[in-house]
Image (spheres, rainbow, N blue to C red):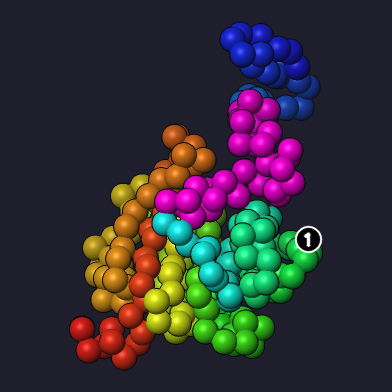
Amino acid sequence: MSRGGSGGRVRVKTGRGRTAASTRWLERQLNDPYVRRAKAEGYRSRAAYKLLELDERFGLLKGVRRVVDLGIAPGGWAQVVRKAAPGACVVGIDLLPVDPIDGVTIFHLDFTDARAPGLIADALGGAADLVLSDMAANTVGHPQTDHLRTMGLVEIAVDFAVESLRPGGAFVAKVLAGGADNELVAILKRNFAAVKHAKPPASRKDSSEWYVIAQGFKGRGEAETVA
């Protein structure tokens, strides 16, 4: 490993047993200011800054008391919520194991498991103010397939949010390039007062991820009347 170029950029030499792709990934990590900042500020991942930036723009965390974090691993978003709202009840779920976070209930379970909604609801103890979803399907390298699989998870998350949010609540979900499709946007607009797409600065420019932000949940009765 060596330093060179402007600004002391770290360059990684391809070592024995390390592929060119893994070398590029390591070099990107070492030179990523968000990675360095996350380590310095105690966040588990650079993804924490995506939520911080979305919150700065949309005011998502102000006054929240109950928050659901779908796809919580490794826990950066939950850390952000806990710092912004120390008294909030935060419930997360993920297929991957997640180290404990003070004040956060974590379920090691597939969100598509039929037991998941009930477990989350019981742990939450009331209607959610905010449902966050950073879930994404494992990619297979085929853009259309990857998009469809991830959007399938987003649709499930939307259904959960509509069943779980209090009136006025908000929903945030990761989508891929192109954003939420027309049908999903129509569902969100029936259920929320405002629906927008955003790509926070912490999201890498070469990444296909965007976020859909839906605010002002109308409540099931009002949404059904509008529909």
Q: Position of residue 181 (x, y in %)?
A: 28, 60
Left or right, 122 with reference to 207 = right
Left or right, 34 with reference to 170 = right
Q: Residue furthest left?
A: 226
Front-most of residues 191 and 57: 57
The residue depicted at 37 percent of the width and 68 percent of the height is 215
Can residue 156 be seen here? The reply is: no
Residue 150 colored in magenta in the image = no
The residue depicted at 63 percent of the width and 25 percent of the height is 31
Residue 51 colored in magenta in the image = yes
Q: How many marks?
A: 1
Can residue 49 be seen here? The reply is: yes
Which segment is the magenta one?
Answer: 28-57
Left or right, 54 with reference to 109 = left
* Quarter of the view holding residue 80: bottom right
The residue depicted at 53 percent of the width and 53 percent of the height is 51
Q: Quadrant of the C terminus?
A: bottom left
Q: Position of residue 191 (x, y in %)?
A: 31, 77
Q: Which residue is mark 1?
A: 99
Front-most of residues 1 and 195: 195
Q: Residue furthest front?
A: 63
Q: Secondary structure at mark 1?
A: loop
The residue depicted at 67 percent of the width and 63 percent of the height is 82
Front-most of residues 220 and 18: 220
Q: Residues within 10 Å of mark 1 (few under 14, many from 20)?
A: few
Left or right, 3 with reference to 154 = right
Q: Where 31 falls versus 176 (above or below)?
A: above
Q: Position of residue 200 (x, y in %)?
A: 45, 44
Q: Where 85 falls versus 40 (above or below)?
A: below
